[in-house]
């Protein structure tokens, strides 16, 4: 019985932890070589669509059988321009906006009427905050290591409900 249990456990662990093979895009072809993509490019109605099709053909984006470009989101460097770089830029810009908004609100609290500063934006203060916001990852790391970014547990109010 012990051997049977050990065998069942070994088989379960073998199939449970075996790496699943990656799903490669073997059915995709480069857009520059796809006949369906070329047909869609010819049927484009305006010049901006034609420029977009030309850009897709030159960039090495892969197309499906329907002629539509497919993004390969696997994190490898050959396809980094399709998803990895734009997503990192999106996170950086979103963090910049959030950090600048936080800095503006903190600086606005020091004014005589902070409520009015939230309704009517103090443009010189906002521009100052925006210009210093580009280094937000370093500033956030600095504030996190010094403890200014997080609050202590005793400073967080808890509802009695």
Image (cartoon, rainbow, N blue to C red):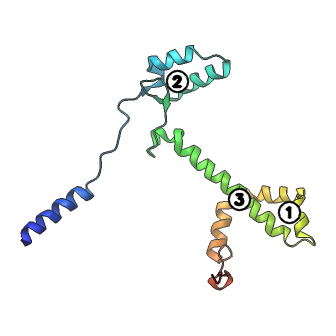
Label 1 sits on residue: 118
| Location of residue 33 (image quadrant) | top left
Image position of 4 (left or right of 38): left
- Helix, strand or loop for disc 3: helix
Task: Please say whether residue 47 is visible from this viewpoint.
Answer: yes
Front residue of 136/38: it is: 38
Q: Residues within 10 Å of mark 2 (few under 14, many from 20)?
A: many
Label 3 sits on residue: 98
Looking at the rendered structure, which numbered label has been put on residue 57?
Answer: 2
- Helix, strand or loop for disc 1: helix
Residue 48 position within the rendered picture, expressed as x and y whole percent measured from the top left: 67, 22
Q: Residues within 10 Å of mark 3 (few under 14, many from 20)?
A: some
Residue 126 to residue 35: above or below: below
Image position of 87 (left or right of 122): left
Residue 156 position within the rendered picture, expressed as x and y whole percent measured from the top left: 66, 80
Looking at the rendered structure, which numbered label has been put on residue 105?
Answer: none
Distance of label 3 from label 2 (alpha carbons):
36 Å
Distance of label 1 from label 3 (alpha carbons):
15 Å
């Amino acid at each position: 019985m012990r051997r049977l249990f050990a065998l069942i456990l070994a088989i379960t662990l073998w199939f449970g932890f075996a790496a699943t093979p990656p799903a490669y895009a073997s059915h995709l072809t480069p857009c520059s070589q796809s006949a369906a993509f070329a047909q869609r490019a010819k049927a484009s109605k305006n010049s901006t669509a034609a420029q977009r099709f030309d850009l897709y053909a030159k960039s090495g984006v892969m197309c499906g059988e329907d002629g539509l470009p497919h993004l390969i989101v696997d994190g490898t460097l050959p396809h980094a321009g399709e998803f990895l770089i734009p997503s990192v830029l999106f996170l950086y810009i979103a963090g910049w906006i959030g950090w600048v908004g936080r800095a503006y609100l903190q600086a606005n609290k020091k004014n005589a009427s902070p409520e009015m500063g939230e309704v009517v934006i103090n443009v010189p203060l906002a521009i100052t905050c925006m210009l210093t916001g580009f280094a937000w990852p370093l500033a956030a790391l600095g504030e996190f290591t010094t403890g200014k970014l997080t609050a202590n547990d005793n400073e967080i109010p808890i509802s009695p409900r």
